[in-house]
Amino acid sequence: MQFLKQPVEFKALPDHAALTCAARVNTRELMAFCRAAHDAERRLVALWGSDERDRDAKFGFALHVAFDLAEGLVCLTLPLPTDDPVFPDLSLPFPAAERMQRAARDLVGISPDAGDLRPWLRHDNWPVDYFPLRRDTPDKQFETKNEDYAFVRVEGDGVHEIAVGPIHAGIIEPGHFRFSAMGESVLRLEERLGWKHKGIERRFVGMGLADGAKLAGRVSGDSTVAYAWAYCQAAEAICGAMPPPRAIWLRALLLERERITNHLGDLGYLGNDVALAFGLMQFMRLKEDWIRLSAQLFGHRLMMDRIIPGGVAVDLDAAGAQAINDQCQALEHELRTLKSIYNEHAGLQDRFLTTGRVTPQLAKRLGVIGLIGRASAQWWDLRCNHPCEPYDLLEPKIATERNGDVAARALVRFAEIGESLRLIRKIIVEMPLGIIHSELRSEPDKRGFGWIEAWRGDVLVALETGSDGKIRRCHCHDPSWQNWPALEHAAIDNIVPDFPLINKSFNLSYSGQDL
């Protein structure tokens, strides 16, 4: 971890906080750290800004950058001058930083000194000098206007543009995709997202830690367990408390059930996108049975609000444990049959193989993470690389593929369902007895971090309390930020009609990444 010739001083935090160190740095130290982290093939985890003018009149803003190191998570804070809050562009060593920097510019008014300066979340929905996350910014409603966004244009004989969205057929979330194509072959894809921006980070401000947990669980509904757990890790670090052992094991049980829920749905929709309606029907049947048991045992189909600061809100009795074991055995049997059908279906394999490929080299350069990264030979899973309890005892296995195409992403999903079934059985056998919740008392002027491997990839929650013990700043980071740019590359040299299939094989979050 000693990347710098003169290392910055790191502050150790509690073991369960999923954080190795945090430090304040200057510009020179930040850039040296970025270069060293890049050379060591480490990842940028998240980037965000904050308004600190009530604490420091001269350096009234701050840039926060979180990195994954071999030892764990590192968060560096760069103070920025109040009158000119500009920071160095980090997108050259870490391309994933570009959209995060644009979001920080829209929300806080801090800006990179180079790179892409187009708006990302603003969409002309508020004035250019209105920054929602500044402390003196009043709540206002503005008249929305049609945005004149400067898409990158591809020119040449026979090149044409196809505009798709932001409103789509069905009930999927809004996102605009601008294709530059020649015939049906895609030359370039540019995304325009941000319509799902909900103002969640501003809503956190002033909340108590308990209320904040409910909001964190609603950042992205299909990842409610992961966000709630990451938030609770951060809150428990602030309070200097550890939840009871049984509660931690129950959290892992809920997280693995959430992982299986989403993988089952995705495998069904992937079959549907290649006209295999049988696949959709079978996997949706399995998914429905799975979430019905979740509702029966835990009181909610998506298990929302089951993870709370200090532990969990629901226990599991012997009958419930047996029901889960029986369901795991039945699902495992059906999954083997369905995987065999997918592998042997010539039409499906013809559409899956080589479609939407992200090479391992490209995935590494872009910093692709989670399921999508593992399908492109990126050996990264937080449960294995930096396991929190109880994953250090469960010893999960990473599922990877090398081809980085739709077929590889489907195979990773099949493998991860099988591994999650194994983990669930092990959790039920080895889960300790005891209480499931302990009371927490918020501490003023503290920071805490939570870091959990959701089904898409690792979710980060950075939480800070103010002098009154209530939430001063909460930043929730979704792995979709890292992976949306890779989708643009995956579409190149494919035909336009294959894009829905490629997009579904990624299945990234609009609401999670836009907040």
Image: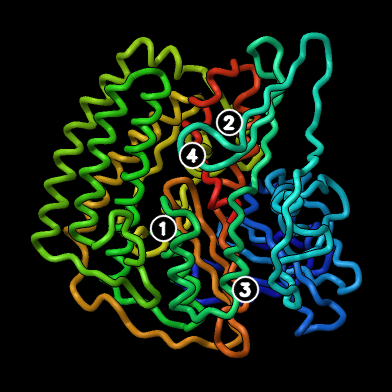
- Of labels 4 and 2, earlier in sequence is 4
Look at the picture and state if 420 lies above or below 28: above
Q: Which secondary structure, mark 3?
A: strand
**Position of 412 compared to 496: left or right?**
left
Identity, as a three-letter code, of the amino acid under mark 2: Pro
- Is the residue under label 3 in contact with that under label 1 (CB below 8 Å)? no
Residue at x-position 60% and y-position 66%: 201
Q: Amino acid at mark 4?
A: Ile
Residue 59 drawn above or below residue 484: below
Mark whose residue sits in front, 2 or 3: 3
Expressed as whole percent of the image width and height from the top left, the position of residue 298 reads 23, 62
- Between the C-alphas of marks 1 and 3, the distance is 20 Å
Residue to which mark 3 is pinned? 473
Counting every numbered tag in the picture gives: 4
Task: Tell me the number on the disc at residue 172.
Answer: 4
**Mark found first going from the N terminus, 2 or 3:** 2
Q: Nearer the viewer, mark 4 or mark 2?
A: 4
Give percent across and percent down for residue 41: 65, 46
> Are the residues at dot 3 and dot 4 in contact (C-beta closer than 8 Å)?
no
Q: Nearer the viewer, mark 1 or mark 2?
A: 1
Nearer to me, 230 or 106: 106
* Residue 388 in the image: above or below residue 480: below
Location of mark 1 (residue)? 224
Measured in 3D between alpha carbons, the distance from the residue under mark 4 to the one under mark 2, in whole angstroms, is 29 Å
Gap in angstroms between the C-alphas marked 3 and 4: 30 Å
User: Who comes first in sequence, dot 1 or dot 2?
Assistant: 1
Q: Quadrant of the C terminus?
A: bottom right
Task: Write the residue at 20% across / 37% down.
Answer: 332
Q: Is residue 178 left or right of residue 80?
A: left
